[in-house]
Amino acid sequence: MTQFFTIATTNYLPYAVSLLDSVKQYHPEFEVSICLTDYLDQDTIAKNPLMSKYPMVQLHEIEAEEFDLITKIYSPMELANSAKILFAEYFLSKKEVEQVIFCDSDILFFNRLPESMIRNHELIYTPHFTSAPSLDMKRQELEVLNAGMFNGGFFKLKKSEEATKFIKWFRPRCVPSCISDRCNGYYYDQLWINFVPLYFKDAHIERDQGMNMAYWNLHERVISEKDNQFIVNQATPLSFFHFSGWDYNQPLEISKWSLFNLDTRPDIAPLLARYHEVLQKNEYEAYIKLPNYYTARNDSQKKSFFKKLKQKLFKKKR
């Protein structure tokens, strides 16, 4: 059995449901789950159609030994990224699960994954891009040098000795220090992934350009439409698009980090329109401001307060 999962906080449930709707459209054979790095009581879930649409596993339910640490110190972003490997290991411990596939919640599927990717390989990640941008766009390369060669928003782990070895290496390094501090070598889970091709001989770097298309690889990938399908570079079906940095309230902007806009890349417009439509249908506006049970009251809020104060004083001094 293939277990597909994503991670969300309560306010990101519209993203998670939109993703799983698209996954089930193209992969009805997958078992799917939302992994909640938040807390909801069962009565609340049962009474809410969106919350109860797909199976949900909450962070406290997997009884990870790092639970107290990560719920006391992390922001929502840090908590979600640290929990990926915890949920992956939890699912792989189940007898019926043969492999897990993870996607960030800000992803939408537009076609099936390549069959070879589903069937083969024990450990799979995707690179941010596979060819060099032009010199005037070297910022893309600099960003990847700081954020990691591979994108942590997608991975596959097949139950195997290699996967066990990976988890034993990755978990104690990533989970307790899943922060963004690039000067000291930390960027959530992504910088650790740089070592994967070196340490794990059976790791597969999936270069299919229909997978994990996003603002960071637009220089090498162009969308067209054929027979009601989105095609990348007139050759490869678009499996999924990663809407990292996209803003629901500014739906015509590709990403807040993108070097492209719709004037230069009108081919992306239909994807943005589709995404806005499905999020609106799944009650984005009703959910987005809901607080996180853990991070609304933990130490990350103190850090945020002092960080804002420092920035305020610094600006005033200047």
Image (tube, helix red, strand yellow):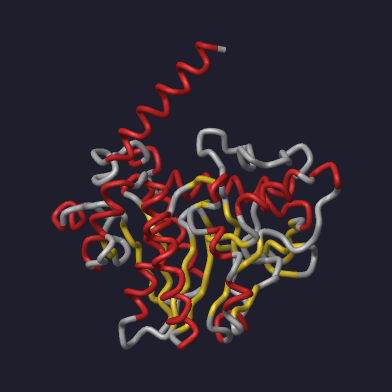
Q: Residue at x 63, y 75 (%)?
A: 198
Q: Percent position (x, y) of residue 208?
A: 69, 71
Residues 18 and 94: in front is 94
Q: Is residue 39 shown to the viewer in this render?
A: yes
Image quadrant in which you'd find residue 299: top left
Residues 225 and 122: in front is 122
Which residue lies most toward the right here?
135
Q: Percent position (x, y) of residue 80?
A: 39, 54
Q: Is residue 17 shown to the viewer in this render?
A: no
Q: Residue at x 34, y 36 (%)?
A: 289
The answer to whether 183 is drawn above or below residue 93 in the figure is above
Q: Percent position (x, y) of residue 50?
A: 31, 54
The answer to whether 281 is drawn above or below residue 105 in the figure is above
Q: Residue at x 56, y 86 (%)?
A: 119
Which residue lies most toward the left here?
43
Dividing the image into 4 quarters, which one contains the C terminus? top right
Image quadrant in which you'd find residue 113: bottom right
- Counting every numbered tag in the picture gives 0
Q: Percent position (x, y) of residue 25?
A: 49, 68
